[in-house]
Image (cartoon, rainbow, N blue to C red):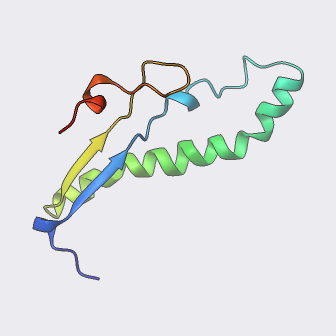
């Protein structure tokens, strides 16, 4: 497949490190600690593969003339049903 830089864009949607920031072992105890340790491979993969590699992608794409668009989905409610004002407005 051949991509034309003038007609191609890299779109990165909602890749944030927020939920992984508290993944350190110091806060949980007891059963929570065992559960936390079970998630260690996931946190390690997210930190060292997904997040870092995704952060590096735009540089390479920009060097080839491909436009990069990075966006973050935000919410005003705990359950995520209400999106930020910019996402609620059409256009």
Q: Who is closer to the viewer here, 88 or 16?
A: 88
x, y (%) of residue 65?
13, 61
Q: Quadrant of residue 13?
A: top left
Residue shown at 49%/33% (left/top)?
Answer: 17
The residue positioned farthest toward the left in the image shown: 6
Q: Who is closer to the viewer here, 13 or 79?
A: 79
Which quarter shows the N terminus? bottom left
Q: Quadrant of residue 82?
A: top left
Residue shown at 29%/43% (left/top)?
Answer: 70
Residue shown at 63%/44% (left/top)?
Answer: 44
Rendered position, 72 above or below 28: below
x, y (%) of residue 79?
55, 25
Q: Who is closer to the viewer here, 77 or 70?
A: 77
The residue positioned farthest toward the bottom in the image shown: 1
Rendered position, 49 above or below 73: below
Q: Is residue 15 left or right of residue 29?
A: left
Q: Is residue 40 left or right of residue 32?
A: left
Q: Is residue 22 left or right of residue 14?
A: right
x, y (%) of residue 7?
14, 67
The residue positioned farthest toward the front in the image shown: 90
Which quarter shows the C terminus? top left
């Amino acid at each position: 497949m051949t991509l034309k830089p003038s007609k191609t864009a890299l779109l990165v949607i909602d890749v944030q490190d927020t939920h992984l920031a508290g993944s350190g072992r110091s806060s949980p105890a007891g059963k929570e600690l065992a559960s936390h340790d079970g998630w260690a491979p996931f946190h390690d993969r997210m930190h060292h593969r997904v997040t870092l590699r995704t952060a590096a992608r735009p540089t390479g794409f920009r060097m080839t003339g491909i436009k990069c668009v990075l966006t973050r989905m935000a919410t005003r409610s705990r359950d995520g049903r209400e999106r930020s004002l910019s996402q609620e407005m059409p256009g």
